Amino acid sequence: MIAILDRLRPSYGQKLFLLATVPLILSAAAIAAIVSWQSSATADREIRALEIQLIEAKKQELRNYVTQARNGFYFIYGGAAPDDAEAKAKVAQILAAMIYGEDGSFFVYDYDGTNLVSPRRTGMIGRNWSGLTDPEGTPITDRLIEIAREGSGYHEYLWPKPSTGEEARMITFVLGFQDWQWAVGTGVWIDDITHEVAAARAGVEARVRRTFLYIGGITLTALLMVFASGLVMNLRERRLADAKLKELTQRVFDAQEEERGRVARELHDGISQILVGVKYALDIARRRVATGDARAGEALARGQENLSGAIQEVRRISRDLRPGMLDDLGLGPAIKALTEDFHARTGIDTCFETVVFRNRIDQEGRIALYRIAQEALTNVERHSGATKVDIDLRGHRRGCTLRIADNGCGIERDSQDRRGIGLRNMQERMDQLGGVLRVLSSKSGTAIEAEIPLSHLLPPENAPPSARASA
């Protein structure tokens, strides 16, 4: 199970890719949703306005039809009495003849609900149609008569279309002839408006879909660009990492060779010469003993003294390679011994201060800070021309800080920018521990501060016995 979870856990590159792509996808989705909503809302308003405009045009057309029809027989209606059957018959005949287009015609109902004129559906003539409704339950005849009694008006309902024989939505304008108690009107079907509105809505939906496709295409292009740029950056970082690894490996080899050369020089210049002196002293002592010379003891004493010097030199080289005091007594005593040896060897005034703190430094931290102190003192001896060095080691809430400051000539900016191998080694040690290295240099001196985080400090109860006495 743990192995499966480890496989599912994204890598650093995958996290960066997700960090770049997820907000982009969410933003594109939000933009698409907002554009779709705004487009739909705008289209609905425009389509509704178009529908209203077209319907108003139809209504105006109906009113014109009825007005023209009324003008055609008004001379008969105006001079006839309410019970003039002959005048009514003439007007009914005129209205029955007013057929226009494929479906247009006039109708007449009396206020009792009887149909008097219906040229397109003659079977309705002479029958009472009170209570007639359309398939949706909308009242037809009663509502038309009610509007006619009020004067005039419009009514919308479903009615069979003569050209197709199918139910379609119709708008009717009806006018009341109050003297004869007639409801005269005509209507037009608005299925063409419905088709036009549907076509407009389909066009809007097509535009919204195209917009979605455009946004999707742009998003996909952006994702491909992110992927391509990430791939390029990954390849570039990999090349840089390989180059840095090769450089680091070469520096490690150089450092090893330099250390081997230093040890070889010290063995040759120190121990080898001392041992040669011991050999000569033993040879002299052997010859004097063979000849009975009383000075054989002096030669043995010189050989013994030289042998003691060789032992001390071996201990010094061993201490430089890996000081046992660092493991046995801790970082504080090890750096103190290092400063005393530095003062004795160089004559430079050296002051070391430390504060005993509760948390103790772990092994990696002790080794790193000791090596930094070693490297810093070596640089002071070789390059600074300083007469005084102050070393301070103390713990704080953020961790532990080692500070080495001298009053030398400082580090030239060009040299500091190039970062010699000593400073690079210091920086790499701090990077491995997650610490910080600060190099502060001026003409009045140089200060190197190495700070390791709190994670490399152990509580007193967890510290090794050798580290409880000192940092």
Image: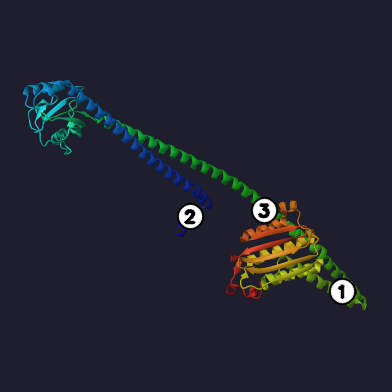
Which residue is the site of mark 1? 302
3 vs 2, front mark: 2
- Earlier-in-chain disc, 3 versus 1: 3
462 over 218 or under it: above or below: below
**Amino acid type for the residue under numbered disc 3:** Thr
| Viewport quadrant of the C terminus | bottom right
**Can I make out residue 315 in this image?**
no
What is the x, y in percent for residue 287?
A: 90, 73
| Viewport quadrant of the N terminus | bottom left
Judging depth in this view, the residue of 349 and 67 nearest the camera is: 67
Identify the secondary structure beneath mark 2.
loop
Q: How far is disc 2 from disc 1 in space, using C-alphas?
A: 70 Å
The residue at the point 61 percent across, 46 percent down is 239
Q: How far is disc 3 from disc 2 in space, using C-alphas?
A: 31 Å
Judging depth in this view, the residue of 414 and 92 nearest the camera is: 92
Q: How far is disc 3 from disc 1 in space, using C-alphas?
A: 46 Å
Which residue is the site of mark 3? 249
Which residue is the site of mark 2? 9
